[in-house]
């Protein structure tokens, strides 16, 4: 495709309506096109038969519906899938699908790499390369749904896959939930991530409800407020420590947006009558943040925050100095929070054998030049 050609996957409904209006067409063409692309999985213009031949030719000449290339697909023994996708500039990202009982969650990346430098995350090791475009974000959902639908009728290998197959048989798409928890900090790619999430939730596209789309952030306070006003999806916030001294070390962004203001922002997000959902994520790191005293501190700072806590057993990667907390320690930590009426669950680790678990996504870079400069521009915290 020529570089002047616009990728229609990068337009949400309102942008696409404007695009058609600008070319002298009616705005309802946007709905037609979204249905072809996202509901019927048709990406070839000649097949879009409810549009005139002239319009199809114009689209063919001036636009494209190019998708990333699937470099590899791995399938875990627990049914989890991981894809390595190659983008138009050669960079690669990872996307993970986690089948569960009566739902399938897709973990979507928002950036190539990440600039936040959280010490326990392997994506941080590769630094930040660039933001993903809207088409590169929404393509991850398109590809997962298409691939999984096409293998939906294959033999059922285990329990998890059985529920995914039944989703397909029930005419539901394999991807029922999206979590923006793959590579990158989604709120540092705000506009593109919001447009892509609007597409995920559009009735003419994938039609997910806003409760089933969750964005995870390391705590970009101003952007969290903006999200609440513009696109209030479910929110997950990476807390990971009960005090600023420790959180400064684990999540360096804490130096800019510390715990107190962050929890105030979470309260604003939840809003009156618990209108929106907020989950606090807490990675369980052995002898770092998992003591009974830290559980007590956490319960104290969360006593006035209407959010549930998700404990994530640490997923190790090569050359990390961290270890996962013992199972009993995690149980004790959870019970201590529950005893203080803080709703807490431990996240089951999935896709271990294919490095598809939280914090293990790495993708691949083409261009590592001026990486540190870009990281500084992204966050403004690291010098
Ligand atoms: N940048 C966003 C989303 C990406 S990571 C954020 O910080 O929230 C999604 C979740 O996985 C975050 O809570 C992150 O802190 C956690 N995580 C990162 N590395 C991990 C690891 N090695 N083990 C377990 N969880 C990890």
Image: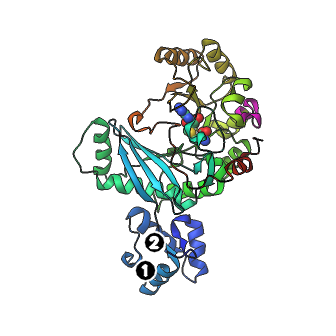
Mark 2: secondary structure: helix
Residue at point 32% right, 47% down?
167
Is residue 235 something one can see in this rendering? no
Residue 32, disc: 2
Residue at point 37% right, 49% down?
73
Q: Quadrant of the C terminus?
A: top right
Residue 51, disc: 1
Question: Is 249 situated above or below 188?
Answer: above
Query: How far from the left and from the top, in percent, is residue 157?
Result: 24, 39
Q: Main secondary structure of the magenta part?
A: helix
Mark 1–mark 2 contact, CB under 8 Å? yes
The quadrant in which residue 308 appears is top right
Query: How far from the left and from the top, in percent, is residue 182?
Result: 53, 44
Tell me which segment is drawn in magenta.
254-263
Is residue 157 something one can see in this rendering? yes
Residue at point 52% right, 14% down?
332
Horizontal side of residue 37 vs 62, given as left or right: left
Q: How many marks?
A: 2
The quadrant in which residue 244 appears is top right
Quadrant of ligand 1: it is top right
Q: Earlier in the sequence, mark 1 or mark 2?
A: 2
Whether residue 70 is in magenta: the answer is: no
Residue 379, disc: none
Model colouring: rainbow
Mark 1: secondary structure: loop
């Amino acid at each position: 495709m020529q570089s002047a050609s616009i990728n229609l996957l990068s337009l949400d409904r309102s942008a696409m309506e404007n695009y058609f209006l600008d070319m002298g067409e009616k705005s309802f063409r946007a709905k037609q096109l979204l249905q072809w692309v996202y509901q019927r999985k048709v990406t070839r213009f000649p097949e879009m038969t409810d549009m005139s031949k002239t319009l199809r030719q114009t689209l063919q000449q001036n636009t494209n519906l190019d998708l990333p290339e699937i470099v590899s697909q791995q399938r875990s023994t627990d049914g989890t899938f991981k894809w390595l996708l190659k983008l138009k500039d050669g960079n690669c990202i990872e996307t993970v699908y986690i089948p569960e009982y009566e739902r399938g969650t897709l973990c979507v990346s928002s950036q190539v790499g990440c600039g936040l430098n959280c010490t326990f995350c392997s994506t941080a090791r590769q630094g930040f390369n660039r933001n993903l475009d809207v088409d590169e974000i929404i393509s991850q959902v398109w590809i997962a749904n298409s691939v999984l639908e096409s293998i939906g009728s294959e033999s059922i290998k285990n329990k998890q896959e059985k529920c995914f197959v039944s989703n397909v048989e029930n005419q539901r798409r394999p991807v029922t939930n999206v979590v923006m928890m793959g590579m990158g900090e989604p709120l540092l790619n705000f506009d593109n991530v919001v447009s892509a999430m609007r597409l995920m939730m559009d009735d003419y596209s994938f039609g997910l409800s806003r409760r089933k789309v969750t964005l995870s952030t390391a705590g970009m306070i101003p952007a969290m407020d903006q999200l609440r006003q513009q696109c209030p999806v479910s929110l997950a916030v990476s807390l990971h420590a009960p005090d600023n001294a420790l959180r400064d070390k684990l999540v360096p962004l804490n130096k800019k947006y510390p715990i107190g203001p962050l929890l105030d922002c979470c309260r604003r997000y939840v809003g009156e009558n618990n209108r929106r959902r907020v989950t606090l994520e807490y990675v369980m790191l052995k002898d770092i943040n998992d003591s009974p005293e830290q559980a007590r501190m956490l319960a104290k700072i969360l006593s006035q925050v209407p959010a549930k806590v998700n404990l994530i057993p640490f997923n190790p990667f090569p050359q990390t100095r961290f270890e996962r907390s013992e199972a009993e320690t995690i149980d004790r930590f959870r019970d201590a929070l529950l005893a203080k009426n803080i709703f807490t669950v431990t996240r089951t680790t999935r896709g271990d054998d294919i490095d598809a678990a939280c914090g293990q996504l790495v993708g691949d870079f083409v261009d590592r030049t001026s990486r540190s400069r870009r990281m500084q521009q992204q966050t403004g915290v690291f010098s």
